[in-house]
Amino acid sequence: MQQPEQIDAALVDFAALAGWMDAAGLPGGPFEDVAQLTGGTQNVLVRFRRGGRGYVLRRGPRHLRSRTNEVLMREARVLSALDGTDVPVPRVIAACPDEAVLGGSVFYLMTPVEGFNASVELPARHAADPAVRREMGLNAARALAALGAVDHAAVGLADFGRPEGFLERQVGRWTAELESYGALDGYPGPDIPGLEQVAGWLEANRPATWRPGVMHGDYHLANLMFSHTGPQVAAIVDWEMCTIGDPLLDLGWLLATWPRHGDESAALAGPLGAAGGLPDTGELVAAYADRADAAAGRDLASITWYAVPACFKLGIVLEGTRARACAGKAPKETGDLLHSITLSLFRRARAFIAAA
């Protein structure tokens, strides 16, 4: 079997893949329309057709990280569990936990998504019509509400994650992450106004009760695919950080990263952020709350609290790139840009606190 020229055999050996697919009872024949997909993920995505059926293969990067294979299998399990729910996700066709098939990386095959990433491109219809862009924003909240409505135990995820003490762990977990950057030579330490204020407020105001559910863990516009024909969410993608926790943290993450005109957040949202016309954060919360089944048992009156840990966590994650840049392990301009976004996120956190 001829290896497609544009795909490195070290990433996807199509002869080995064909043998595995045949053994799994999937349609045979030559691989057609093979293309490597691009996006924000570090994982490898390859789209192809075989036996009259379309597939997207997802595997780890060339240089696997310590938990890459574990994370990929977790993704496949969650996506399989969500199949048949109202949550718009790619459907897993088959998963391979055998690292030997593709040179050390596990992988899974899923259905292709017919849609576009609005942080990368904006089709003419969506760019021209602010009403369509407004609905895109509201649909981002509605799709998240559908995820929040899923009973994780009923779909087979009762043993997935550690929901006990989940909220209590957040500040300590990310404070320790920030402190770990001190091991990088050249990093002078965090210069983040409001860091201690935000951490203290989070600990003092943490919700006393909450209901566990499936969390995406990184829910923002860049991880959504929208329909080419309208404002519908075609799929929620990139599930590397999925777990069982408090789903309102996903809504808080959406609020924390929501593009605002003239803010660094608009740049992160790409063409959609630049075009504007999106609903405000209050309208997002209202769209989420309209799904009564998602809101049941969750205190949306505390939603401001959930936006603050999102700012806190994401700001610390981005500061890690600045620390690596100071150590010469990332471009200085990238570190400077992400540090500016970190400062913006902590300003936003303090604004959320002032409004609470």
Image (tube, rainbow, N blue to C red):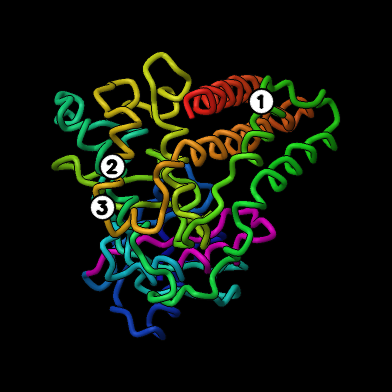
Residue 40 on the magenta span: no
Vertical side of 168 occupied by 52: above or below = below
Residue 127 falls in which quadrant of the image? top left
Q: Which region shows up in magenta?
A: 53-76
Residue 200 vs residue 125: left or right? right
Q: In the figure, 35 relative to 200: above or below?
A: below
* Disc 2 crowd, CA 10 A, few/some/many (<14, 14-19, 20+): some
Q: CA distance from mark 2 to mark 1?
A: 29 Å
- Judging depth in this view, the residue of 290 and 150 nearest the camera is 290
Mark 3 or mark 2, whichever is nearer to me = 3
Say if mark 2 contacts mark 1, CB within 8 Å. no
Q: In the image, which disc is placed on residue 116?
A: 2
Query: Do labels 1 and 3 touch, CB within 8 Å?
Result: no
Type of amino acid under label 3:
Arg
Closer to the N terminus: mark 2 or mark 1?
2
Residue type at tag 2 = Phe
Q: Residue at x 74, y 37 (%)?
A: 178
The residue that mark 3 highlights is 291
Instruction: Describe residue 32's horizontal placement relative to residue 330 as left or right.
Output: left
